[in-house]
Image (tube, rainbow, N blue to C red):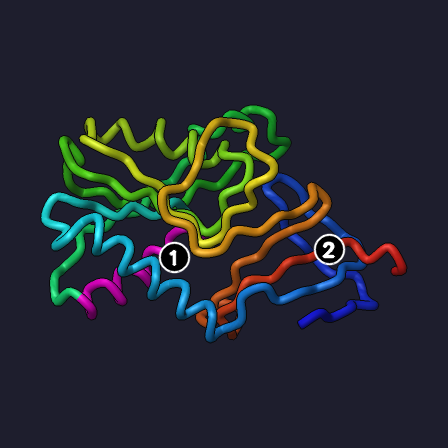
Amino acid sequence: MVKFLNKIELIFGANKLYLSPMEKQVILNSKHFELTLNRLCYQLIESHNDFSNSVLIGLQPRGVKVLDRLKAMLENITGHSIACGTLDITFYRDDFRRRERPPIPSATNIDFSIENKRIVLIDDVLYTGRTIRSGLDALLAFGRPSEVELLTLVDRRFKRHLPIQADYVGKTVDTLISERVSVEWKEIEGEDKVVLYTPNNNG
């Protein structure tokens, strides 16, 4: 589904607020959104079995939404409680000191040691890889895991700044620098979907 927007749309990038006429295309609707999360659950189960030595960690803020949904689905499928945590990377970002306004950190909730654990870092969109690099740095403050894997709901694969790849990918999309990908949740935006925003040159 493609929707042309005649008004000015607010699109939030990693560091800027973009104001421009945008073309809006849904690349994962609610049905395929749920199917994608379900597939990721079974891929995790195949690799981690009963999760007895595994921990899922969502990166604040948007990776936590992916984590919450996966945790509920995994516990329903396996019947096991899944160890989870949330990780804020604000002060580990490489652009931390370049921002005009002081950043407001989110909560980190890891009340256990990750020493020798198998960790799955979770975020909603993988793009340049810089957020994940920051997450790895922040993670090491809590111990030395035996292994770290990466799960992302959307992989924008053509603009890496760092050699980082995901082990579990919900949807791979090929995008331009000028485009934006937004993962939207029914608890926040009213519907589960992934949207691609493209500048409307006719606007």
User: Does the magenta run of residues contain 72?
Assistant: yes
Question: What span is in magenta?
Answer: 62-77
Image quadrant in which the C terminus is located: bottom right
Establish if 61 lies above or below 104.
below
Q: Nearer the viewer, mark 2 or mark 1?
A: 2
Occupied quadrant, residue 24? bottom right
Report x, y in % for residue 195: 60, 62
Mark 1: amino acid? Val
Occupied quadrant, residue 45: bottom left
Measured from the top left, where is residue 143 in percent x and y? 19, 28
Query: Helix, strand, or loop for circle 1?
Result: helix
| Quarter of the image with the N terminus in it | bottom right
Task: Tell whether label 1 touches label 2 (CB within 8 Å).
Answer: no
- Residue position marked by numbered label 1 in the rendering: 66
Residue lying at the far right in this picture: please name it.
202
Amino acid type, label 2: Thr
Q: Position of residue 71 (x, y in %)?
A: 26, 60
